[in-house]
Image (cartoon, rainbow, N blue to C red):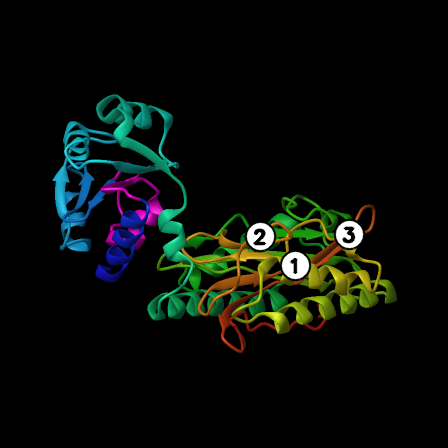
């Protein structure tokens, strides 16, 4: 944690700030290890690291963040935080803070309060060794859940039933909660990239897209597989294999030094070989860590260049209105000469 504070203080110095108020829950955890209290705040200056929370969480804060100066006060912006910030000079404040909290701080600090965006998130992009292990474990649990689904799913089940199996499987295998509401969409519903599981019954010949993940000790997993129910006709097999080719090609391109925009462009060009790029309606991937979607974004507009120990997804999909859709997604750790795939589930078309 001290190294994280050191890097943040270097960022503050480069930005000509004397301190920063941290509001985002993931950023609070990243810097202090404190997991409690929706309305906790951090104030970090060159000399001090202060954690503000109310009486319900002071014991927890003392245990989880013993090196921090603990200040008890009612959330979200109490007198002590305002006064400490006022005495600290030019102070940044995260743009995730509520309007009310911002205005309360602005009334106290005036022009000395400066909105900042992404300062801690930039630090979180490169994962440390312990973070990588947690991400590997989160992905391993996801792969185990997928393996269990292959023997549990059968024709006649509803999409909602499949989604519930995912939720219970993640919890039973050690996840704290889901990374997001699982996607389990079949048939023509699979043409919706973020479709919501409904009462549709799985039918023989359907494609079923499964996109899910869970948080393990604070770190998220994310994977997508598309399977066939009972049988797969030639069109489904052909489209699946073409998408799989593009997805595997994208994974092969991942390495330090590759621009995210170029990665996205090359995956789209691969799909264009099969005249499928017009059905690819989102970015090729995104960062993953304490949040399910974080920097870097892998899209045509991305300014990011991949660096070692970034963790990203590679998830092209094709979505054809009136027919359905297919998506295949891996989470990978960027290395200097390639990448490590941490979602170790089979990607060949599976008929269940």
Task: From this view, report whether residue 243 is shown above or below residue 113.
Answer: below
Give percent across and percent down for residue 169: 49, 60
Reading the image, the residue beneath label 1 is 264
| Extreme residue toward the right, this view | 234
**Labels 1 and 2: the sequence-earlier one:** 1
In the image, taking residue 338 as reference, residue 44 lies left or right, namely: left
- Magenta range: 16-40
Within-10-Å neighbours for mark 1: few <14, some 14–19, many 20+ = many
SS for dot 3: helix
Reading the image, the residue beneath label 3 is 279
Q: Nearer the viewer, residue 89 or 155?
A: 89
Residue at 22% x, 24% y: name it. Answer: 108
In the image, taking residue 89 as reference, residue 323 lies left or right, namely: right
Residue at 83% x, 67% y: name it. Answer: 238
Residue at 15% x, 37% y: name it. Answer: 55
In three-dimensional space, the C-alpha distance between marks 3 and 2, rounded to whole angstroms, equals 20 Å
**Labels 1 and 3: the sequence-earlier one:** 1
* Whether residue 126 can be seen here: yes
Task: From this view, report whether residue 172 is shown above or below residue 78.
Answer: below
* Whether residue 176 can be seen here: no
SS for dot 1: helix
Instruction: Report if the CB atoms under discs 3 and 2 are less than 8 Å apart.
Output: no
Reading the image, the residue beneath label 2 is 302
Residue at 77% x, 62% y: name it. Answer: 271
């Amino acid at each position: 944690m001290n190294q994280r504070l050191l890097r943040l203080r270097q960022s503050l110095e480069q930005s000509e700030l004397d301190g920063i108020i941290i509001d985002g829950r993931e950023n609070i955890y990243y810097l202090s290890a404190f997991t409690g209290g929706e309305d906790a705040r951090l104030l970090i200056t060159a000399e001090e690291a202060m954690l503000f929370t109310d009486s319900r969480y002071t014991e927890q804060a003392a245990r989880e963040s013993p090196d921090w100066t603990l200040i008890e006060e009612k959330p979200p912006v109490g007198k002590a935080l305002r006064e400490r910030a006022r005495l600290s000079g030019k102070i940044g404040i995260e743009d995730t803070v509520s309007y009310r909290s911002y205005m309360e701080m602005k009334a106290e600090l005036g022009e000395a309060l400066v909105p900042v965006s992404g300062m801690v998130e930039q630090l979180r992009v490169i994962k440390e060794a312990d973070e990588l292990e947690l991400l590997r474990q989160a992905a391993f649990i996801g792969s185990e859940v997928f393996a269990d689904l292959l023997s549990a799913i059968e024709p006649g089940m509803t999409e909602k039933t499949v989604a519930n199996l995912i939720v219970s499987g993640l919890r039973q295998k050690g996840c704290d909660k889901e990374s997001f509401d699982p996607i389990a969409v079949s048939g023509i519903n699979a043409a919706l990239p973020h479709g919501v599981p409904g009462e549709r019954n799985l039918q023989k010949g359907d494609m079923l897209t499964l996109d899910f993940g869970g948080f393990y000790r604070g770190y998220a997993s994310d994977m997508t597989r598309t399977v066939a129910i009972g049988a797969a006709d030639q069109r489904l097999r052909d489209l699946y294999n073409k998408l799989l080719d593009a997805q595997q090609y994208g994974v092969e391109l991942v390495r330090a030094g590759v621009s995210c925009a170029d990665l996205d462009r090359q995956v789209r060009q691969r799909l264009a070989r099969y005249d499928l790029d017009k059905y690819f309606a989102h970015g090729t991937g995104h960062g993953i860590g304490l949040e399910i979607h974080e920097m870097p974004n892998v899209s045509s507009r991305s300014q990011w260049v991949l660096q070692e120990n970034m963790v990203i997804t590679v998830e092209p999909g094709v979505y054809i209105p009136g027919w359905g859709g297919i998506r295949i997604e891996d989470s990978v750790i960027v290395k200097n000469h390639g990448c490590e795939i941490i979602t170790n589930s089979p990607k060949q078309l599976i008929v269940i």
